[in-house]
Image (cartoon, helix red, strand yellow):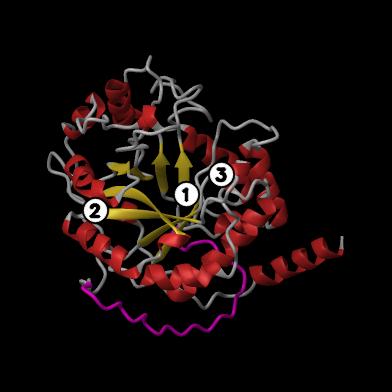
Amino acid sequence: MIKRLCFFSLTLVFLFVKPSITHAIENPAERPNNKFGIHIIDENDLEDAANLVNSKGGEWGYVTMVIREDERDLKRWQQVFNKINNLKLIPLVRIATTINQSGNWEKPKAEESKKWANFLNKLPWPTKNKYVILFNEPNHKKEWGNEISPEEYAKISRIYWEEFKKESDDFFVLPAGFDLSAPDSNETMKVENYFRAMYEFDNLIFTIFDGWTSHSYPNPDFCGSPNDSGKNSVRGFLWELNFLKNFNLPQDIPIFITETGWGCSKADYPSYLKQAFEKAWQDKQIIAVTPFVLNYNSHPFKQFSWKNPDGSYKPVYNEIIKIPKIKGDPKKPETIKKIKNKPLLPELILYEVVDTRILPNFLYPSLKLG
């Protein structure tokens, strides 16, 4: 009870404090935007990704990629980002921990947040916005140290948000995508219950994010129709928006569908995906759609791969490459530094932190607290 009263009192104080930190991120919906994207596992697939998402008149499509804690090799990723720049791709970087001997992802540690922010800020990002996704599907035990803890995820998200924003206002911080079809079980938690628990722990948690990450898969069994609606469909992002409107999530927040796709032999994947892009994902609020996955021919995601073991591409790749695309024009950083052998020195940024509450992004005036 004391804890709740203290938190409530602090919240009331914060509501009347004027923030001193200005959000410098750009709203990608306000500029020409090529929403076509793809999820990759290996940076060696970047050229094929660019050929796909920037085909038919397109430029600056998106690529979702993962960097683990044990992969924070500055020289390696500076070279990768130089290539991303040259290919006119926009990276959505999902940060990850490491897999332990039990096959579970370790829980993120608070002290790693500064290391992540410092490392990622030294990379030559091709756009002013530096898109970072905070981990993956934490409503699965295996994704969170073999535990389910919405409270811990909320706490860690706030800590990482603060460290990224201290390092650079250009960090565009996104939450993990959640498994919308997970049941309440020994291994998973229903996303409704997970969201409620996050909110009960911190009733401002859904105001901190600069965009929303959605895993809008066509369920059940990754076999649904592109015409379906609801939580377990390619329109799952709409269900999330509607559900979270009572938990302070801005309703005009930019949407990033970083995972979707059909993993069912019965589905007409090429036709279904084309229909989804033409209908379900036409909403201007959707900034990027990066289906999972371009090239992964091992268990357990082999059925999602757009590439065959022999190196040839499946029909879905050839279908999407034919769709006309937009020439994106994302805002660029003031200077894009090409890195060769020596790392960038991080810029010195001074902050006068008056408001310790994480405030809603000023880009989204629809948010109303209280």
Q: Main secondary structure of the magenta part?
A: loop
Q: Which residue occupies 33% across, 32% down? A: 305
The picture places residue 361, in percent across and down from the top left corner, at: 49, 62
Q: Amino acid at mark 1?
A: Trp
Q: Give whichever of discs 2 and 3 has the lower sequence position.
A: 2
SS for dot 3: loop
Q: Which residue occupies 36% across, 17% down? A: 267
Local crowd at mark 2 within 10 Å, few (<14), some, or many (≥20)? Answer: many
The picture places residue 51, in percent across and down from the top left corner, at: 17, 43
355 vs 56: above or below: below
Q: Amino acid at mark 3?
A: Gly
Comparing marks 2 and 3, which lies closer to the viewer? 3
User: Which residue is under mark 3?
Assistant: 103
The picture places residue 179, in percent across and down from the top left corner, at: 54, 37
Segment colored magenta: 339-363
Residue 139 can be seen, yes or no? no
- Could you tell whether 99 is left or right of 1 in the image? left
Q: Are marks 2 and 3 in contact (CB under 8 Å)?
A: no
**Which residue is the extreme one toward the top?**
266
Disc 2 to disc 3, C-alpha distance? 32 Å
- Could you tell whether 232 is left or right of 78 in the image? right
Q: Amino acid at mark 2?
A: Leu
User: Which residue is under mark 2?
Assistant: 89
Q: Which residue occupies 60% across, 52% down? A: 248
Front residue of 164 and 1? 164
